[in-house]
Amino acid sequence: KNEVEQSPQNLTAQEGEFITINCSYSVGISALHWLQQHPGGGIVSLFMLSSGKKKHGRLIATINIQEKHSSLHITASHPRDSAVYICAVWFGNEKLTFGTGTRLTIIP
Amino acid sequence: DAGVIQSPRHEVTEMGQEVTLRCKPISGHDYLFWYRQTMMRGLELLIYFNNNVPIDDSGMPEDRFSAKMPNASFSTLKIQPSEPRDSAVYFCASSLARQGFWYFGAGTRLSVL
């Protein structure tokens, strides 16, 4: 069964802290997306990865295929990083499943 | 390129009416996706197209929903007849590949009264 689980559901941190958001999935996948959705509602793609690690500015995404797990890290967090972060997984049967999202709040 | 363009941004209609949502993908992108987002169910993939051909419509909730892509620069999602439970934000996205980086439109917020 294609299942995706994100943790934590909510995360509050102080500005400058290192942030980690997790995404676990049940069976083999072909690709995983990380998305960001600000309170205004628009969705922005952050990363698409199928192996290894990608970095863009203060954001880092990693995936461990053997452990069926991906992490999104934010270094030197800032209030503008406050958003909902969503992972989306393409399973091997070509079905796409979304996680329920992690609501991140960064306090100045 | 102006990005993915969706219209209208907001739609309020009465139950039983037909609703048509529109999407213009980024030029040159071969894939177009329609998603729905609700508080209860989160984000869901409804249907996606490759080169204007529907590839997977298994996410379309029922026969009241239909989607078309008559050409590479335009797609519609139609709900007929609409019901209050269809109230949601509908997003369109395009990409160069099925598992490629997604570019989202701003979304259409639909309210069915």
Image (cartoon, rainbow, N blue to C red):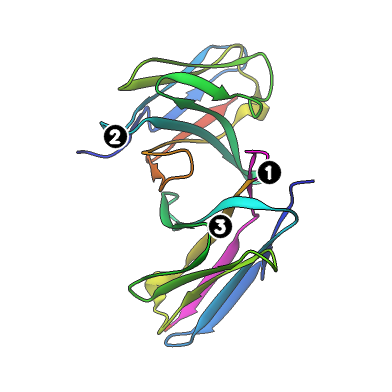
A31 shown above or below A15: above
Disc 2 or disc 1, which is closer to the eye?
A: 2
Q: Tag 3: Cα neighbours inside 10 Å, few (<14), some, or many (≥20)? A: many
Q: For the residue marked with disc 1, what is the amino acid?
A: Arg
Which residue does the image show at 53% across and 62% down from the upper left? Answer: A51
The chain holding disc 1 is: B
Could you say which is closer to the camera, residue A75 or residue B81? A75
Which residue does the image show at 38% across and 33% down from the upper left? Answer: B9
Which residues make up the magenta segment? A92-107
Q: Report if the CB atoms under discs 3 and 2 are less than 8 Å apart.
A: no
A85 shown above or below B73: below
Marks 2 and 1 share the same chain: yes
Asked if residue A96 lies in the magenta stretch, the reply is: yes
According to the picture, the residue beneath numbered tag 1 turns out to be: B41
The chain holding disc 2 is: B
Could you say which is closer to the camera, residue B113 or residue B62? B62
Could you say which is closer to the camera, residue A61 or residue A66? A66
Q: For the residue marked with disc 2, what is the amino acid?
A: Ile
The percent position of residue A90, horizontal first and vertical second, equals 60, 46
SS at badge 2? loop
The percent position of residue A94, horizontal first and vertical second, equals 62, 38
In the image, farthest residue toward the left: B1
Which residue does the image show at 69% across and 53% down from the upper left? Answer: A28
Alpha-carbon distance for marks 1 and 3? 13 Å
In the image, farthest residue toward the right: A1
Q: Report if the CB atoms under discs 1 and 3 are less than 8 Å apart.
A: no
A53 shown above or below A38: below
Q: Tag 1: Cα neighbours inside 10 Å, few (<14), some, or many (≥20)? A: few
Q: For the residue marked with disc 3, what is the amino acid?
A: Ile
Residue B26 image label: 2
